[in-house]
């Protein structure tokens, strides 16, 4: 419905707030209002992984975890697409999302981390090391 779309849009936009409490409230609202598995919501949140501010990308990773259960193929596919971005900071954030959304012993996760360890960016390699430590 139009009202629900406006509410979701409002929640999504608050992920971009400069205020930490507003971002955290938006992440909580995603879990409470939207719930798991809604592909439109996952896509609406995931595109913020390309935002130029790190705090928005961090909130986005947390938001995705509210919207998709671990191992969700759709969410992981959307996030893996972002891993091809030219900006290393964005690739690193996308990698954090892949780790957060993946089951710890998923072979595709291990392949993704191994590939990220060879990324030309130190930041992405550092994120891959952090991801390996979480397994």
Image (cartoon, rainbow, N blue to C red):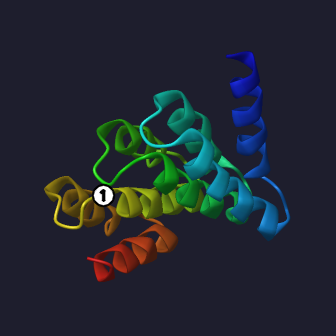
Q: Whole-percent x and y of residue 44? A: 60, 35
Judging from the image, what secondary structure is the residue with disc 1 in?
loop
In the displayed structure image, the side of residue 108 where residue 118 appears, left or right: right
Q: How crowded is mark 1: few (under 14 residues within 10 Å), some or many (20 or more)?
A: many
Q: Which of 79 and 11 is in front in this view?
A: 11
The residue at the point 80 percent across, 61 percent down is 22
Residue beneath the point at 20% across and 63% down: 110
Residue 134 at x, y percent in the picture = 32, 79
Q: Where is residue 77 in the image (x, y as percent from the top left)?
A: 36, 39
Q: Point out the image quarter for the N terminus.
A: top right
Badge 1 is on which residue?
Answer: 102
Q: Is residue 1 above or below residue 48?
A: above
Using the rendered view, name the quadrant where residue 106 is placed: bottom left
Q: How many labels does the image show?
A: 1
Q: In which quarter of the image is the C terminus?
A: bottom left
> Camera-side residue: 111 or 119?
111
């Amino acid at each position: 419905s139009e009202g629900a779309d406006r509410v979701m849009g409002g929640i999504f936009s608050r992920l971009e707030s400069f205020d930490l409490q507003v971002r955290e409230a938006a992440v909580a609202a995603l879990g409470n209002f939207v719930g798991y598995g809604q592909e439109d919501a996952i896509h609406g949140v995931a595109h913020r992984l390309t935002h130029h501010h790190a705090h928005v990308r961090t909130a986005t990773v947390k938001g995705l975890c509210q919207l998709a259960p671990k191992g969700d193929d759709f969410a992981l596919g959307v996030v893996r697409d972002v891993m091809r971005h030219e900006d290393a900071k964005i690739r690193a954030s996308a990698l954090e999302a892949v780790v957060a959304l993946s089951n710890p012993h998923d072979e595709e996760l291990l392949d993704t981390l191994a590939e990220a360890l060879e990324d030309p960016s130190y930041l992405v390699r550092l994120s891959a090391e952090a991801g390996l430590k979480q397994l």
